[in-house]
Amino acid sequence: MTIEVRPVRTRREKRKFLTFPWTVYKNDPLWVPPLLPERAKVIDPEQGAFLKRGEAEFFIAWRGGRPVGTICVAEDPLTNEMRGKKECVFGFFEYIEDADVFRALVECAADWGRARGLNALYGPWNLDYEDSYGMLVGGRDRPPALMCGHSPAYYQDFMERYGFEEARAQNVALGFDLAETPQVQRMARVADRIRKKDWITVRQANFDRWDEEIDNLHRLLSQSLAHLEDHVGWQRESVAAMVAPFKQMADPELILFAEVRGETVGFLPGVPDLNEVFIHVNGLRFPWNYLQLLWRMKMQKVSSLTIKSVLVLPEYWNTGVGILLFDEMAKRAIAKGYTWVDLSITSLDNPNTIILAEHMGAEIYKRWQVYRLDL
């Protein structure tokens, strides 16, 4: 049958677009369904942070009256200008195991990009440069942590056979058991020596001064990661939108900032890995799923802590700021009953973070790849 790729126009088509992943992952026990209310905000022009600064269009591939794939294509003028690029961002890229469906979606995206004078497809990014980006290319033995992506093995094969090339170094997640291991004890001894110098202060986040903390985070993101190849710059509104959901779920005692003489120089946030809960509530697709969520949030103890970022200003690398943050986090997390830590996501071309994590006994357990296709 003929495959027809059409833009999403109606409310019903938007619902089909958002719920199509249930077709792809229905038999995958590792998949954590995205929370549909949150995904709906991302693609809503009135609420989506990306859509307030860029343009995006959403497409569904149909065959025989049934959806067989989805893709979003977008232009981010400000980020392209900052990076000196003319790239067409793509995401929400889901498809059944059929090369013709894959090809039809990619050709649709390529045509959209060319019509706007763009010269490459770049992604996948779901209109958010930090949430569920890249194709999973390694680590299929446990579900992903919060904000980490998951995809079938055939996705990578289709991308590379079509001619997509690796756009940047792989992104990885590291994990380690949170216990009094020799590595943790060694880190504690080093941290104690740093504390005695009494020039670095670690404090918890102040949620009563939320806007000031967003300013601190935005500055740290902009300056701490600028050295990475192909780094995507941050707009403040995107930072605010990214962390807004965490205000409700995070424990401020586990959102840590490091200061030197009153200047904020480091950041280490730990939040409960609520994917342990979300994997059981079907993305809040139906009304009864909300009752499941309420019950599990009340009764289920989350055992894993996820750390989504380790930021230290370049001038404070190798000064002990990172060690002090990690040691303080370990002490607080153990006291609160967490038993495992996920560190995600960092890039292989950001070795300082990986080395620091490995000193805690962490090992890489998942890998993702972002791709580019010249048009």
Image (cartoon, rainbow, N blue to C red):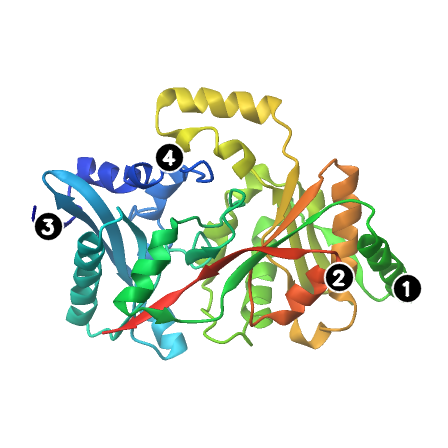
Marks 2 and 1 close (CB-CB < 8 Å): no
Name the residue beneath numbered marker 3. 4
Of helix, strand and loop, which one carries label 1?
helix
**Who is closer to the viewer here, 317 or 27?**
27
Labelled disc at residue 27: 4
Residue type for callout 1 = Arg
Mark 3 and mark 1 lie on one chain; the one further toward the N terminus is 3
Relative to 325, 221 lies left or right = left
Residue type at the position of mark 3:
Glu
Residue 262 visible? The answer is: no
Disc on the earlier residue, 4 or 1: 4
Residue with the most extreme left position: 2
Mark 4: secondary structure: loop
Q: Name the spot of residue 310 as percent of width and height, x first.
A: 64, 60
| Label 3: which secondary element | strand
**Badge 2 local density, few (<14 within 10 Å), some, or many (20+)?**
some
Q: Which mark is residue 359?
A: 2
Observer-nearest of 232 and 22: 22
Label 2 residue SS = helix
